[in-house]
Image: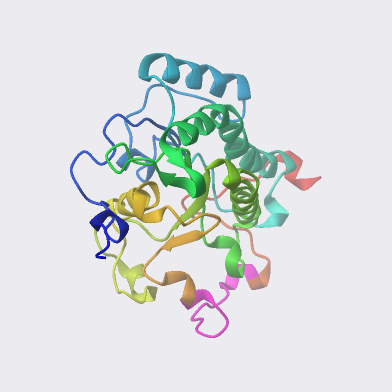
Amino acid sequence: MPLDKLDYVSSVWRDNLFAGKVVFCTGGSGSICSAQVIGIGAVDVRRVESLQGAVDRCVEELGGIDFLIAGAAGNFLSPVSNLSPNAFRSVIEIDLIGSFNATKVCLPHLLESAKKHNSQGAIPKSTEAGPGGRIIYVSATLHYTGTPLQTHAAVAKAGVDTLSNNIAIEYGPLGITSNIISPGPIADTEGTRAKIIPLGRWGLVKEIADATIWLFSDAANYVTGQTTVVDGGAWRTQSPSGSSFQYPDFLLSGEKITGVKGTKKESKSSKL
């Protein structure tokens, strides 16, 4: 007996794939997350009551939440010696606590969506209706090998990865899938740094959006607890086996950083 077409063909790129679906996204003001969504207002992800208000408004106006993208992040360049406890805490609160808060307030609605749209094992009840109850966390590759001047961000993103993995295990039986997208160097044009990327170019924002579509589509029904790195292979060149990294002179000498865009300014508390 021949197989039904729906048993071996997934509708990943068809028109109106997500018709009627609602995505709640934190971090929508950045280029990566803004490629997928239209913002509904400013929200402080560190304050769960602020997020709860946004979720309530979203559900009231749009009828529910089917997908969550937790992408809020804060970052700057700083060696540990110049990193105040408050600055370190701020990044942890935005990246890690913010991701937890977003998960916490969206979870009841995601569970409802999974129950409505999915059958056992996160398989959509109808390919026309599409799946529901899916989470994507936006992470990074900083913590894979360690990155100078990025300790705070690396620690935060390592926590985000662990959060996603545990959500996948805890809520998989209820139809929720939880995965990570770790973007690499993203820009609209090529630059000199593209020489360290195996594919030889910067990534495009749309390529992050494409990975998002795949994870939210029925092609990823059996994918959870995973990390999708979209970086042209860049993080592989940072590994011990293929590294071209050289320590900058200022880091070896202990010289203070000056004139570098994005550097965290020294504060009195960092001297304590």
Work out whether 78 lies above or below 195: above
Q: Quadrant of residue 37?
A: top left
**How has the structure been colored for display?**
rainbow
Name the spot of residue 167 as percent of width and height, x first: 61, 46
In the image, residue 183 lies at what x, y percent?
42, 57
Q: Residue at x 30, y 53 (%)?
A: 210
Quarter in which the N terminus is drawn: bottom left
Query: Seen in the image, is 124 located left or right of residue 86?
Result: left
Left or right of 176: which side holds 85? right
Q: Which of 157/185 is in front?
A: 157
Q: Is residue 91 left or right of residue 261?
A: right
Query: Of 196 and 172, which appears nearest the observer?
Result: 172
The question of residue 216 being in magenta is answered with no
Q: Is the residue 115 above or below the residue 55 in the image? A: below
Q: Is residue 164 visible?
A: yes
Nearer the observer, 60 or 153: 60
Question: Above or below — where is 208 with respect to 147?
Answer: above
Q: Is residue 179 left or right of residue 208?
A: right
Q: Main secondary structure of the magenta part?
A: loop
Q: Residue at x 56, y 30 (%)?
A: 45
> Which part of the image, by quadrant, shows the C terminus?
top right
> In the rendering, at what x and y percent does residue 116 appear?
44, 31
The magenta segment is 237-251
Is 240 in the magenta?
yes
Q: Nearer the viewer, residue 135 or 188?
A: 135
Residue positioned most to the right: 272
Query: Which residue corresponds to the image point at 37% horizontal and 49% vertical from the top-left?
Result: 212
From the top left corner, tell me how far across and down residue 105 is, in percent. Answer: 58, 27
Residue farthest along the left direction in this orientation? 15
Is residue 137 visible in the rendered image? The answer is no
